[in-house]
Image (tube, rainbow, N blue to C red):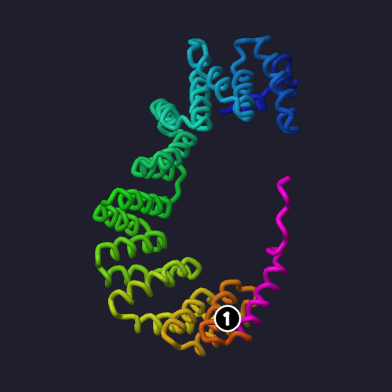
Amino acid sequence: MSWFGRWRKQPPGGPQGGDAAVRRALLAVLDRDLPSAEKLLAGAARQDSQDVDAWLALARVYRQRGEIGRAIHIHQNLLLRDEIGTEARREALLELAADFRQGGFLRRAIASYEEVLSQDRRSRPALAALSRLHCDVRNFEAAIDAERRLAKLEGRDAAAIEASLWVDVASSARAEGEPVDARRALRRALRRDKDCVRAWIALGDVEAERGKTRAALAAWRRVPALDRRRAVEVYPRLAACLADAGRSAEHEPFLRSLVESDPDDPGARLALARTLAADAQPDEAVAEIRRLLERGPDNLEAYGTLGRVLLAEHRDPEAIKTFAELLEVLERGGLLRPRESSR
């Protein structure tokens, strides 16, 4: 239980002495008056040096003010005391770990949270913090273990989070030049969550790097069915991969099928227009973009693409009109306002 939780359990007669100071300090914190809170809590701690709550609250104020060294000093001193109870000691250790974390001492923070878990394996704050900290230091498998344990305690399914973490493992493996390990991690991600879009995109990248064109295409083509917004990331990949394989003709029918299944999907329609333009079908490309602008007249990418297609076809008057319309959209959106001078 936190120092604030213990203060709330005071008897009906109300807080007295140091507890009154803690109460006034709490009000000062709520008013964002940290100097006054510090003064009140420091006074309460000096008045009764055995008041662990006052020390914990004072250290919390120091941490909020960015005075990490002072917060660490208080928590370490509390942990050296023999007379404080188990619960207070555990809270001081949790707070010390939070100090280390905010101060950027990530390894020391991890060690402190692990010490908390050695005393209480069901500590949710420690497990939640460790999941994030292990990600920060790129120890993703340890993060997965912490997330699993936390999910079990909370009675929830951690599949989606675990899958995302396995994608991070794969990203790290790719950066280290280990495509086989990356692929293995991505397969584990998809076993945990077959609808993980990040995993399918990354798997396509890994397969393409391995020269496995068919596998790469299969992975990327899964994305539009899962998330049309994220699908815009794979359309250029698909086009490039098909072109390298001499199969560019396959891309247009694929995009048309997506547009037919969802005529209001701007990403698929714009990708189709770009493919038509690249395939020397400028009139069809222009027609698709105009249909897109009928549905979304503020689509900046559509205006830009239309303008470039028209310029490439030497249809300068139409291109000028398109870019003028683009400027109007930018102006309406407040994107043409002059920047404020830094002077």
Q: Position of residue 143 (x, y in %)?
A: 39, 42
In this figure, which residue is indicated by the disc labeled 1?
Answer: 292
Residue 82: percent from left, percent from top: 48, 10
**Above or below — where is 46 with respect to 99?**
above
Q: Specify the quadrant of the image occupied by residue 251.
A: bottom left
Residue 330 visible in the picture: yes
Closer to the camera, 31 or 52? 31
**Where is residue 113, by image quadrant?**
top left
- State which quarter of the image contains the C terminus: top right
Q: Amino acid at mark 1?
A: Leu
User: Quick check: 204 above or below 260?
Assistant: above
Q: Position of residue 176 (x, y in %)?
A: 30, 48
Q: Is residue 109 left or right of residue 289?
A: left
Left or right, 163 with respect to 13, comes to left
Which residue shows up at 30% across the image and 50% down it? 173
Residue at 33%, 65% in the rendered image: 204
Q: Residue at x 30, y 55 (%)?
A: 188
Q: In which quadrant will I find the N terminus?
A: top right
Percent of width and height locating residue 170: 33, 52
User: Considering the numbered disc 1 on the image, is that residue within a helix, a strand or a loop?
Assistant: helix
Residue at image point 67% right, 27% down: 8
Any magenta on residue 54? no
What is the span of residues highlighted in magenta in the rendered image? 318-343
Q: Nearer the viewer, residue 330 or 82?
A: 330
Inspect the magenta stretch and tell me whether residue 335 lies in it.
yes
Foreground residue, 28 or 135? 135
Label 1: how many Cα within 10 Å (few below 14, some 14–19, many 20+): many
